[in-house]
Amino acid sequence: MLELTILGNGPVCPNPGGASSGYLVKGGDTSVVLDIGPGVVATPEFRKSLPELSGIVISHLHIDHWLGLVPLSYLLKLSPVTHANTPFKVWTPPDTRTQLLKFLDELSMGYPLDAYDVEEYTAGTVLCLPGLQIKFQQVQHFIPTFAMRIENDAGSLCYSADSSLCEPLISIANESSLFLCEAGDGITSPKNSAQRGHMTGREAGAAAANANVGNLLVTHIWESHDPDQILTEVAKEFSGACELAIPGKTYKVVREQPTALSHDAPKG
Ligand SMILES: [Zn+2]
Ligand SMILES: [Zn+2]
């Protein structure tokens, strides 16, 4: 079994009523959350999963991918929520552990939280957890950022993190059953941008097509971007099943490539 639940699909500022990046992945005996942006801790699906959560995997240190660690540290310390694995495991990109701990310390204003056991992962190595494994690949973004590929016997899920359309992304997404891909640039790429760090819907579709993935979920979307227009752009490049990643929905990751995405109805 491999399942993905969308906790947040927003960009750097959460969309109204929503959360920035946060994705719950369950496989075998393991549940992990990929990124924890603002608003993720407040989602019912995150709170429900918390007692069984093995840890949180951070793609990069832009705040929409880790700032939820701050309120979570207070929750772990001060609320009756119990967690068997405290200090809570956090996996962070190479050479970011010291910086992340410094951010957390400064934001707690000296209050001793000590909530996390922070470990760096490395590109090229595989994080093996009971029931699933995670590989990492650095992709093109404004700061060091790592896409992830989560696999077990049921299938494979690739999460783009924040990325422009680039060869390393296509490489790690190759033939994945489900590709969770950002389209933070929406409909048209920004003008006067020396370096790209996000994709349009059309580029997300091109990444999916070039990687020959099964199905595509588009995420990291601004509310000002029309979802239907983004999906129209995706369809110019990718002919497989595609939809917007909707908070609260759970998607089954299966090796066969169904013509429609398999998911439960959103809750609440
Ligand atoms: Zn970013
Ligand atoms: Zn982001």
Image (cartoon, rainbow, N blue to C red):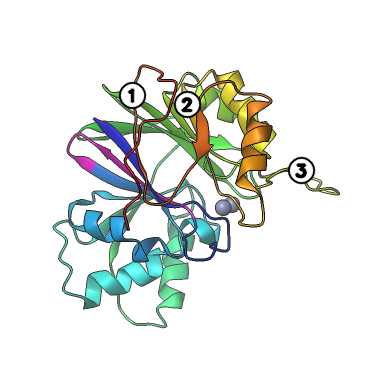
x, y (%) of residue 221? Answer: 59, 50
Q: Quadrant of residue 251?
A: top left
Element under disc 2: strand
Q: Is residue 157 left or right of residue 231?
A: left
Q: Secondary structure at mark 1?
A: loop
Name the disc covering residue 189, or none: 3
Mark with earlier residue (1, 2) = 2
Query: Which three-letter amino acid code belongs to the residue tagged 2?
Result: Asn
Report the residue marked by disc 2. Answer: 215
Q: Find out whether the residues at labels 2 and 3 contact each other: C-beta distance under 8 Å.
A: no
Q: Which mark is residue 216?
A: none
User: Magenta stretch mostly in which secondary structure?
Assistant: strand
Q: CA distance from mark 1 to mark 2?
A: 10 Å
Amino acid under disc 1: Val
Q: Are marks 1 and 2 in contact (CB under 8 Å)?
A: no
* Residue 112 spot, x, y in % from top left: 30, 78
Type of amino acid at the residue the image marks with label 3: Ser
The C terminus - image quarter: bottom left
Write down the region rendered in magenta: 21-30
Q: Quadrant of residue 98?
A: bottom left
Disc 1 residue crowd, few under 14, some 14–19, many 20+, Cα 10 Å: many
Determine which residue is flagged by label 1.
254
Is residue 249 shown in magenta? no
Between the residue at mark 3 and the residue at mark 1, the CA separation in whole angstroms equals 32 Å
Answer left or right for 53 relative to 166.
left
Residue 260 percent across, percent down from the top left: 43, 26
Left or right for 260, reference 167: left
Which label's residue is closer to the chain start, 2 or 3?
3
Label 2 environment density (alpha carbons within 10 Å; few <14, some 14–19, many ≥20): many
Q: Residue at x 17, y 38 (%)?
A: 29
Q: Nearer the viewer, residue 242 or 120?
A: 242
